[in-house]
Image (cartoon, coloured by chain):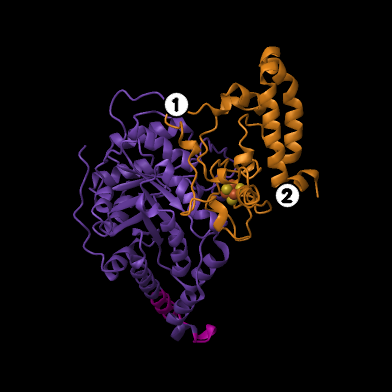
Amino acid sequence: MTEEAQKTLVGSNLEHVLQNGTFAVTGELGPPQSADGNVIREKLNLLKSYVDAVNITDNQTAIVRMSSIGAGTILVEEGMEPVIQMTCRDRNRLAIQSDLLGAYALGMRNVLCLSGDHQDFGNHPTAKNVFDIDSIQMVKMVADMRDKGLFQCGDEFKGQKPCFLIGAAAAPFADPIKFRPYRLGKKVNAGADFIQTQLVYDIEAFEEYMDKVRELGLHEQTSILAGVGPLKSPGMARYMKKNVPGILVPDKIIDRMSEAGKPWSDIKKEDRTKEDKKARSQAWRKEGIQICVDLIKELQKIEGVAGVHIMAIEWEEAVKPIVEGAGLHPRPEMKTPVL
Amino acid sequence: MSLGSWLRDRPHFLEIVYKAAENFVTRLDPLISWIGYDRVERLITPPEEIAKEIVFDCRMCGQCILHSTGMTCPMTCPKHIRNGPCGGVRGNGHCEVKPEMRCVWVEAYERSLHMPIYGTEMTQLQPPVNKSLRGRAAWITMLTGEDKEVPAGWEGISELTILDADHTCWFSSQEE
Ligand code: SF4
């Protein structure tokens, strides 16, 4: 954020929570691969009153889903605050701006600017991508609309400006690790008000990252929400450690997960009944939630961490015990924007 | 090893060449402007394209920022990110989209550490690309100033660099 820019208050609940210095909690909701709005309402019921705002993914992993703004409209109707995720993969600068004008008019106040997963990973690998601008340029574009009243081309706004709380993502553990704090700095310079990080399991590595972030003074210019997510099984933990770039899973966490399922894992494979498997899966999930709670408690101690972003997509039930377990319930009363 | 990769592994040499070429072209500006930018551009575009293609796998975006990105062409990134790298870089430093290719931005980062002249520019904000300059000779768009025309709101911000607390060069703390 440059000095000369006039920072406008956007009036979102998330902004309110962060400004009050309350440890923020955001959640995440993946829209369905269908046009059924009730899926959104059902998932929302599991998150309501446990988080301050809910991210709505934008064709996550490049798989076609209900649009984030469409789903966000349902959230607004239900009295919940969305964080609209917006990727550069599917829209050029015209489309991004026009979609955001619409989102603002529909009552949305937070946006998360992302590059987006490449279409090769999704269900339309033969599609053409856009990538007209990158996520950092998008942050700046949205900030200029709000703070300077300018479209990206430099034209001035005539009427209501879209005033969003602007978020961006950070990958503290992706290569080149030493450059990551500086890239965060670029996002801050572009105007990111808040940051949601990739999943954190390795507290020590994250502390090192935050040391550098504090040295650069970035934690004072943006609110950093550390990403957390409950593990479902030791297999999932091992898979992430091995295959997902930018996620570090320490062995002691994998061991904790294995240990939790030990009574059933010790039963010979051919003797293991369906009930045994079910019981083991439940034990794993319980431990996964407990690990998540423990991580949040550790994260709360790190200076410069303003909150957590809980990613429990397709396992929204886990959010309640996590937030309660971490002592973060009840959440501050929801402040809905004036429409 | 190709000539291109041999050269790219000598980023400090390349930045010196770049700086010299920039000086040279800037000095020739009055002459070029007298002959006519259009005419000169028609002449130099093909050789510029061939040379930069061989050395940098250049995509002729028309607003060259090679010296700010570790002498590595950012347009070869599958997501065309000008302010990279994205969060998907693999553990071995390869691209998440093209596993056989090293991430363009990992290379840019590593090379910038060997670039005392321009290395710090890695932390500058790169404005959106002006797609209408595609295919143009970047030396000419530099002289005409077209490559630096940024949208209102972007003035000045692109020069911001992120420095370490001791205000030294940003990568002073990066051991190799
Ligand atoms: S991994 Fe590197 S080269 Fe690949 S898309 Fe991301 S930034 Fe671009």
Quarter of the figure with residue A305: bottom left
Which is the main secondary structure of the residues drawn in magenta?
helix
Q: x and y percent of residue A192 in the render?
A: 39, 45
In the rendered structure, which segment of residues is drawn in magenta?
A266-284
Disc 1 residue type (three-letter):
Cys
Q: Please state, as top left, top right, bottom left or bottom right, where the C terminus of chain B lies in the image.
A: bottom right
On the picture, is B80 further left or further right than A46?
right
| Residue at the (38%, 69%) spot, across then down | A295
* Residue A280 located within the stretch drawn in magenta: yes
Q: Secondary structure at mark 1?
A: loop
Indicate the colour of chain A. purple
Q: Which circle marks residue B9 in the picture?
A: 2
Q: Position of residue A314 (x, y in %)?
A: 40, 59
Residue A302 place in picture, x, y as percent: 36, 65
Residue A311 seen in the figure:
no
- Under circle 2, the secondary element is loop
Q: Residue at x 67, y 20 (%)?
A: B29
Q: Disc 1 designates what residue?
A: A153
Distance, label 2 to label 1, CA atoms, is: 38 Å
Amino acid at circle 2:
Asp
Q: Colour of chain B?
A: orange
